[in-house]
Image: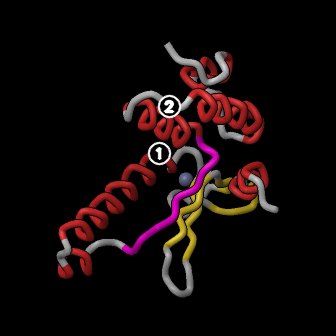
């Protein structure tokens, strides 16, 4: 069984070159869901900008699907699967979840345990917001 820790280990690739700047050592993957699939890898410097750009494309694609507009959908970028071991992604996920209303305390405690487990495999220092979330076992102000 592949765990989230196994996945995090595959995202750190010290021998892969970043598709953004060419530097060795990547922390993120963007997989285009084409046949065959194509995978782009990014370093910790390039990932925040690439992530923002790619999320905008995915938003455009989803809006085209919702609108049922075949021309707009044809012009939209192919669906992608984004994965990283960047705290930026975790922080964004948690912020969005919190903005949608209260999180079930059991779920929040599970997330806090997972983030603590992931911490040694994540890229860069843990953001204060996530550190606090872990320390409080998913309980929030
Ligand atoms: Zn790079």
Q: In which quarter of the image is residue 111?
A: top right
Q: Which of label 2 and label 1 is nearer to you? A: 2
Dot 1: what SS? helix
Dot 2 or dot 1: first in sequence order is: 1
- The residue that appears at 36% across and 61% down in the rendered structure is 58
- The residue that appears at 65% across and 54% down in the rendered structure is 26
> Residue 87, which numbered label?
none
Extreme residue in the bottom direction: 35
> Compared to 17, does 49 lie above or below?
above
- CA–CA distance in space, label 2 to label 1: 26 Å
* Residue 83 position in % (x across, y down): 58, 56
Q: Quadrant of residue 29?
A: bottom right
In the image, 46 versus 61, the foreground residue is 61
Q: Say which quadrant the N terminus sits in.
A: bottom right
> Which segment is the magenta one?
78-86
Q: Quadrant of residue 134?
A: top right
Left or right of residue 34: residue 113? right
Residue under label 1: 48
- The residue that appears at 58% across and 19% down in the rendered structure is 139
> Compared to 4, does 102 lie above or below?
above
- The residue that appears at 56% across and 80% down in the rendered structure is 37
Extreme residue in the right direction: 1
In the image, 104 versus 45, the foreground residue is 104
Left or right of residue 98: residue 22? right
Left or right of residue 72: residue 77? right
Crowd rating for badge 2 (residues with CA inside 10 Å; few <14, some 14–19, many 20+): some
Residue under label 2: 103
> Compared to 70, does 28 lie above or below?
above
Dot 2: what SS? loop
Q: How many labels does the image show?
A: 2
């Amino acid at each position: 069984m592949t765990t989230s820790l196994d996945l995090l280990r595959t995202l750190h690739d010290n021998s892969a070159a970043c598709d953004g700047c060419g530097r060795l050592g990547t922390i993120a993957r963007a997989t285009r869901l084409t046949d065959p699939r194509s995978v782009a890898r990014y370093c910790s410097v390039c990932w925040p900008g690439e992530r923002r750009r790619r999320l905008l494309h995915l938003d455009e694609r989803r809006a085209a699907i919702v609108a049922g507009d075949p021309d707009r959908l044809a012009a939209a970028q192919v669906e992608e699967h984004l994965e990283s071991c960047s705290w930026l992604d975790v922080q964004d996920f948690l912020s969005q979840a919190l903005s949608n209303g209260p999180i079930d305390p059991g779920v929040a405690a599970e997330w806090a345990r997972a983030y603590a487990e992931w911490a040694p495999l994540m890229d860069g220092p843990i953001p204060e917001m996530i550190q606090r979330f872990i320390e409080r076992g998913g309980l929030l102000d």
